[in-house]
Image (cartoon, helix red, strand yellow):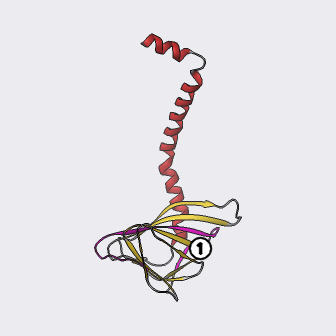
Amino acid sequence: MSATFDKSFGRAEARPFHLAVIAGLAFAFLIAKALPQTVDVISAIVEPLCMTGNSPGSTLDTVEPIASHALPNVPGKRVTVVRVSYGPGGFTRAHRHAGSVTAYVTKGEIHSQLAGGPVETFKVGQSFFEPPGATHLVSANASNTEPAELIAVFVADEGAQLTTFIE
């Protein structure tokens, strides 16, 4: 069996396959080494853009940057994706966003209210939209016992402060 393997390994048509496997493994190794640093760089760029002011809510509430990319077909615009996690009873105080925001609930239930509208409750799999500059009066976990989470996708001007709290 090893003689057969040695013969096939040495054949000219087998070499590109083996080189591709080796190159793929080397590339995977490099990505694994660079990924933590890349995530840190993205976080360092996006985090200051996400919020200003004091603590947004309870200490169990977090905003985690996921990705941020310039939109090549829309000069001057950037798409930014963040994960908003609310602990039981968690909330974000009243705020505005510089750009358009689409939120998608991934865990629990979220209460949301824009100025001039009713308080709505969104469940896992549902989404809602916030136009640029709208006052977001209520953004809160609907449960006092279970966590809730949403993914927010911002489309805003390059370098814009994504979230500004209302005093």
| Camera-side residue of 71 and 8 | 8
Quarter of the N terminus within the rendering: top left
Q: What is the residue that sits farthest to the left in this orientation?
A: 145
Furthest residue in direction top, as rendered: 3
| Bounds of the magenta segment | 139-164
Q: Position of residue 102 (x, y in %)?
A: 54, 70
Q: Secondary structure at mark 1?
A: strand
Q: Nearer the viewer, residue 54 or 123?
A: 123
Three-letter code for the amino acid on which mark 1 is drawn? Ser
Q: Nearer the viewer, residue 1 or 74?
A: 1
Q: Is residue 157 magenta?
A: yes
* Looking at the image, residue 70 lies above or below residue 11: below
**Vertical side of 132 occupied by 48: above or below:** above
The answer to which image quadrant residue 162 occupies is: bottom right
Name the residue: 56% across, 21% down: 14
In the drawing, does residue 22 fall left or right of residue 56?
Answer: right
Numbered label tally:
1
Residue 6 in percent (x, y) is at 49, 13
Regarding residue 161, the answer to whether it shows in the image is: no
Determine crowd level at label 1: few under 14, some 14-19, many 20+ residues with C-alpha closer than 10 A: some
Residue found at x 51% / y 46%: 34
Q: Is residue 5 in sight in this rendering?
A: yes
Q: Which residue is painted at 50% across and 39% down in the image?
A: 28
Horizontal and vertical percent position of residue 41: 53, 56
Magenta span includes 151: yes
Q: Percent from the top left, x then y, of residue 99?
A: 60, 74
Tell me what residue is drawn at x 48 percent, y 43 percent.
Answer: 33
- Which residue is labeled 1 in the image? 100
